[in-house]
Amino acid sequence: MTRILLWRQMQPRTRQSGASAVEFAFVFPILLAVFYSTVVYSYVFFLQQSINFAAQQGVQAAVAVVPTSNAATDTSNRQAQALAVVLSSLSWLPASQKTRVTEPAVTACPGATGAANTFSYEVSFTLTGLFPTMVNLPTNIGTIPPLPTSLIACAVAFD
């Protein structure tokens, strides 16, 4: 019995029972913000690559349409074919996110020359409200994580 008491008396007493809880309270929000931002940005990057691919596939399908003697019919056939391929390429999206894809449009993409045999196609995806924000900062600063309002992909093909 005497040995046990002496051994306990020799051990220094440390009073850090609550220190780890306080450290955890400071570090956990930062780690949570980093993890959440990583997941959100990974998904946004994947969405951007997906709509880029969909726009590219839509333009390629539109150019593959066999032309006829009627230019108006050719344009409508190209638009219909491009739309079908774009929607098919984005079919993996959940139903709630499919509504965020705006109607793909035949537009003049930046950098398109506007020549008679170019076909450009733009696909956009609205990000507003897709992910909840962790922190709303003052008006001029924004939110965490900061995200764009929409993702836009534009593809150009030459006949």
Image (cartoon, rainbow, N blue to C red):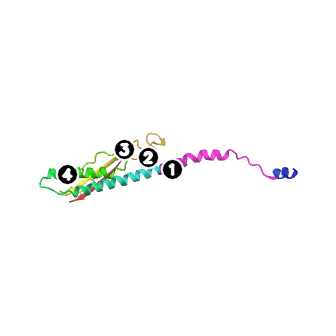
- CA gap, disc 4 and disc 2: 40 Å
Disc nearest the viewer among 2 and 1: 1
Check disc 4: other Cα within 10 Å, few if <14, some if 14-19, many if 20+: some
Query: Amino acid under label 2?
Result: Pro
- CA gap, disc 2 and disc 1: 14 Å
Task: Name the residue beneath numbered marker 2.
Answer: 146
Task: Name the residue beneath numbered marker 3.
Answer: 95
Marking on residue 77: 4
Q: Residue at x 34, y 47 (%)?
A: 125
- Residue 105 on image: x %, y %: 26, 48
Give the image quarter of residue 116: bottom left
Mark 4: which secondary structure? helix
- CA gap, disc 1 and disc 3: 26 Å
N-terminal label among 4 and 2: 4
The residue most toward the left is 69
Residue 42 at least partly seen: yes
- CA gap, disc 3 and disc 2: 25 Å
Mark 3: which secondary structure? helix
Disc nearest the viewer among 1 and 3: 3
Check whether the beta carbons of the residues at disc 4 and disc 2 lie within 8 A of each other.
Answer: no
Check disc 1: other Cα within 10 Å, few if <14, some if 14-19, many if 20+: few
Task: Name the residue beneath numbered marker 1.
Answer: 35
N-terminal label among 3 and 2: 3
- Residue 10 on image: x %, y %: 82, 52
Query: Amino acid under label 1?
Result: Phe
Query: Amino acid under label 4?
Result: Asn
N-terminal label among 1 and 3: 1
**Magenta-span inclusion, residue 17:** yes
The residue most toward the right is 2
